[in-house]
Image (cartoon, rainbow, N blue to C red):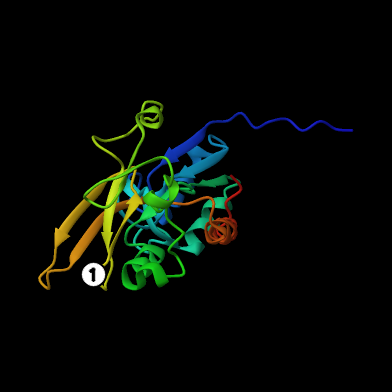
Amino acid sequence: MKKKHMDNRPMLNLYPDSLGGTVESLCQILDREEFADVFSSVYILPSIYHSDLDRGFSVIDYDLEGKYASKESLKRLQKNGLYLKLDFVLNHASVQSPQFQDLLEHGKKSAYKDFFIDWNAFWEGCGTMTDEGYLMPEKAYLEKMFFRKPGLPVLMVEFADGSRAPYWNTFYQEIRQTADYRKRYLGQMDLNIRSQAVWDFYKETIGKLAGYGAKI
């Protein structure tokens, strides 16, 4: 049986707007004779999708950002014999995602109420309720946790009907007041891997990325 050898040529890592400006421009660069057989694969970071913060890692949805890429340009890239690697951000999503926007609009009646991590439900029986309406976990739990920012990773989410609930928010958050006195959120919300809706989302997204030609 013939053994398969690993292709040990380097992988080209890039943001879609940082080398040529678009994937189409990247294809033109890699078509040059001096780049023939230099790379085995190309890793395009997540600003290739619809995103709003964090250099693309705050993903709104996994549709292609048209100013950077198209399905045709990705196919052309792979015609050079390059494997395509794309990012899938498993642990959080932008507050502008359709799932979080549905939660804001419909509150606890939302089909996505468990798509994100309800802080109080997660810590039920493991802490005491604060005046602000979120559970303070016992010290024994907090001592074992690493936080990426000062304070607890909690965002008090205000729904359209005026009710509020705390949700887990490990990464960036910002709250702005709109002209109609409603809150506008910026940031990323942690996904709840105990939710079947999240696993359905994972499956759907992997299918979409595979449809773009991603092998990695």
Q: Residue at x 38, y 61 (%)?
A: 65
For the C terminus, the quadrant is top right
Q: Residue at x 60, y 59 (%)?
A: 207
Q: Position of residue 197 (x, y in %)?
A: 54, 61
Specify whether residue 18 is in view. yes
* Camera-nearest residue between 46 and 169: 169
Specify whether residue 47 is in view. no
Q: Position of residue 119 (x, y in %)?
A: 38, 49
Q: With respect to residue 65, does 14 lie above or below?
A: above
Q: With respect to residue 107, does 9 lie above or below?
A: above
* Camera-nearest residue between 143 and 202: 143
* Camera-nearest residue between 44 and 119: 119
Identify the element where label 1 is drawn: loop
Q: Is residue 158 found left or right of 137 in the rendered image?
A: left
Instruction: Tell me the crowding category of disc 1: few under 14, some 14 to 19, or many 20 or more residues within 10 angstroms, Cα based.
Output: few
Q: Residue at x 26, y 73 (%)?
A: 161
Q: Position of residue 148 (x, y in %)?
A: 31, 34
Q: Position of residue 111 (x, y in %)?
A: 46, 69
Q: Disc 1 residue type? A: Gly
For the N terminus, the quadrant is top right
* Camera-nearest residue between 162 and 200: 162
Q: How many marks?
A: 1
Q: Which residue is mark 1?
A: 162
Q: Is residue 109 found left or right of 130 in the rendered image?
A: right
Q: Residue at x 45, y 65 (%)?
A: 112
